[in-house]
Image (cartoon, rainbow, N blue to C red):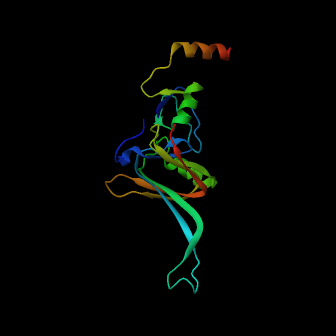
Amino acid sequence: MKITLLKRLAVEGSKPLAKGTTFSVTNEYAAELIQKGYAVEFGQEPTQKEDKNNNKTEE
Amino acid sequence: MSTSGIMNGTLLGVYVGSTLVAHATEGSISLSMDTRDATTKVSSGYRDLLEGTRSGSISVSALYADDATYGVNALMTAFSNRTTLTVKFSTEVSGDDYWSATCYLTSLEVSAATEDNATYSASFEISGAVTFSTVS
């Protein structure tokens, strides 16, 4: 699945990938990154609700 | 829904540690099994064989880009560290079959010809069993 990073991410054995990087990963890994809020499926925008939740968690 | 009909090779990609090898132009998996010669005097002049060690390799060729998300930089790290990698050969289309295995990077070749794309190819030797399953 093609994803776009919402945060900087260290990929195994590679240089850290910058926020906004679009690349393809396995479906399982994509689901994991999306669930953790690290990425969205390519072409999709992060939801406002998720952003608010992330802020609350960080506080 | 799985891919129907004769598969277009473009769909199959090589994933290393869950990340697709960027700018790939070719990919392949090769599996083989050694045999033990069990020919005896009662083999009627024909060779008899028994099963032996199974092995395999996965290869990928790609265009070289220094800023690739997964390319020569990452492969050089794997080569330097001599660590095992999980390599998957898959369409990542739900219902399609895929191969996955623990591998060592055993070969990395970068080519750069005048006024042509710089390219590279990598070979991964499989260590242990090969998983052949269906993309969920």
How many numbered discs, if any? Answer: 0
Q: Is residue A2 left or right of residue A11?
A: left
Residue A32 visible in this rendered orientation of the protein: yes
Q: Quadrant of residue A11?
A: top right
Q: Measuring from the top left, give residue A36's x and y in whole percent.
A: 60, 26
* B125 versus B24 height, above or below: below
* A34 versus A48 height, above or below: below
Which residue is the extreme one toward the left? B115
Residue placed at 59% from the left, 42% from the top? A12
Question: Between residues B73 and B115, which one lies in front from this camera angle?
Answer: B73
Which residue is the extreme one toward the right? A59
Residue placed at 42% from the left, 50% from the top? B62
Question: Between residues B71 and B26, which one lies in front from this camera angle?
Answer: B26
Residue placed at 44% from the left, 38% from the top? B93
* A15 versus A19 height, above or below: below
Quadrant assignment for the N terminus of chain B = top left
Q: Quadrant of residue B129?
A: bottom right
Q: Measuring from the top left, give residue A30's x and y in whole percent.
A: 53, 33
Residue A7 visible in this rendered orientation of the protein: no
Q: Measuring from the top left, give residue B7's x and y in whole percent.
A: 36, 47
Q: Is residue A19 left or right of residue B120?
A: right
Question: Between residues A25 and B131, which one lies in front from this camera angle?
Answer: B131
